[in-house]
Image (cartoon, rainbow, N blue to C red):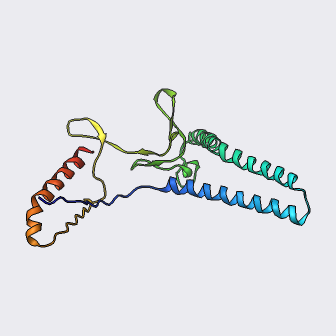
Amino acid sequence: MTTVDTLSVEITADTSAFRREIGEADKLARGFGTSMSRAFANAVVKGQDLGSVISTLGQQLSAMALRAAIRPVTDGLFSSFQDLLMGFRGLGAGVTAEAGPLSGLVPMARGGVIAAPTYFPMPGGRTGLMGESGAEAVMPLARTADGRLGVAAGGAGGRPAVVVNVTATDAASFRRSEAEVTAMLARAVARGRRGL
């Protein structure tokens, strides 16, 4: 019996948060390089002593690190304050989303991703917090035929394309491994249906 060694599956993922973090790291690295260059240029051109240059450089790097460390906190506070203001401004009647204070709102009726800490209203006057530990998905719920509430499968997309490459030396070897390949695909489909 021939063993199939490979199975190719195409995966699509949202990498926007990762790209944003890489951009932040790139900015920090550029800032570090600029600070180093400026400090040593000042030492050479202006004749500053090395101790003073290193002290100034250390202060600049500490300030950069502090700004990077508190940015998530300040972004979260700003988002909360903005959400609070949007809630108060949205109390007026007759305001359209295109011209009024709701123009900054992102509709989530069809789903979406929350990538930063965000507050939201809950029943009973409570406030919820989402996205505090990273990106979170917002998915619309639907009632099933038996009345249960859950996430609706499917959507606008069609069935996923699955490509299976089988390498065989000749037709006879393919026929010998056909049952094994079929069983492997059946197991993969069953796992996919169970959500594993």
Q: Position of residue 63 (x, y in %)?
A: 75, 47
- The residue most toward the top is 124
Side (left or right) of 153 relative to 132:
left
Q: Residue at x 51, y 54 (%)?
A: 18
**Which quarter of the image is occupied by the C terminus?**
top left
167 over 94 or under it: above or below: below
Q: Residue at x 83, y 49 (%)?
A: 55
Quadrant for the N terminus, please: bottom left
Q: Quadrant of residue 171?
A: bottom left
Report the residue at 74% width, 50% height from top: 61
Q: How many marks?
A: 0
Q: Nearer the viewer, residue 143 or 94?
A: 143
Pick the residue in front: 4 or 35.
4
**Left or right, residue 78 beside residue 182:** right
Q: Residue furthest bottom?
A: 170
Residue 157 pos. (x, y %) = 30, 59
> Seen in the image, is 104 located left or right of residue 34?
left
Quarter where residue 30 is shown = bottom right
Residue pushed farthest right?
47
At 19% across and 66% down in the image, what residue appears?
A: 166
Q: Position of residue 76 (x, y in %)?
A: 60, 41
x%, y% of residue 137?
Answer: 42, 45
Residue at the farthest front position: 1
